[in-house]
Image (spheres, rainbow, N blue to C red):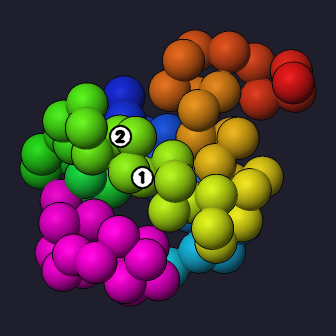
Amino acid sequence: MGKAGNALKMALETYGISQTQLAKTLGIGRSNVYRWVNGVRDPNSETLVLIVKALSELNPEAASLFKRLYMDESPLQD
C-alpha cells in the first residue's frame, strides 16, 4: 500500500470518517477513495491537496493526522 493510502486509511479510521463521506466532500465516486485506501492507486499531488481540504471540512484533526503521517512526522507532534 502506498504512503498516502496508509495515511488516509489511518485518518479515516481514527476519526470515524467513511470513504463515502470523503468521496462526497471531494465530489468523486467512492471507488476512487477505496482504491487509495486499499493501495490499488495512489492519489496524485493535486489530489493530495484536495484530500487535505476535504478532511479539514469533515474533521480538522483528521486532516492534521493525515498530513503528519504522510510527511512522516510523529502523530503526537503539532
- Taking the image as shown, residue 16 lies to the left or right of residue 53, namely right
- Taking the image as shown, residue 49 lies to the left or right of residue 54, namely left
Instruction: Determine whether 8 is above or below 56 in the image.
Output: above
Whether residue 21 appears in magenta in the rendering, the answer is yes
Image coordinates for residue 1, horizontal then vertical, percent: 26, 37
Q: Which residues are magenta?
A: 20-35
Q: Which residue is mark 1?
A: 51
- Taking the image as shown, residue 75 lies to the left or right of residue 5, namely right
Asked if marks 2 and 1 touch (Cβ < 8 Å), the reply is yes
Q: Which residue is mark 2?
A: 48
Instruction: Determine whether 40 is above or below 19 in the image.
Output: above
- Taking the image as shown, residue 46 lies to the left or right of residue 41, namely right
Q: Bin the neighbour count of mark 2 within 10 Å (Cα to Cα): few under 14, some 14-19, many 20 and up.
A: some
> Tag 1: residue type?
Ile
User: Going 27% across and 65% down the picture, which residue do you hit?
Assistant: 33
Image coordinates for residue 44, horizontal then vertical, percent: 18, 36
Image coordinates for residue 13, horizontal then vertical, percent: 60, 64
User: Going 78% across and 52% down the picture, which residue do you hit?
Assistant: 61
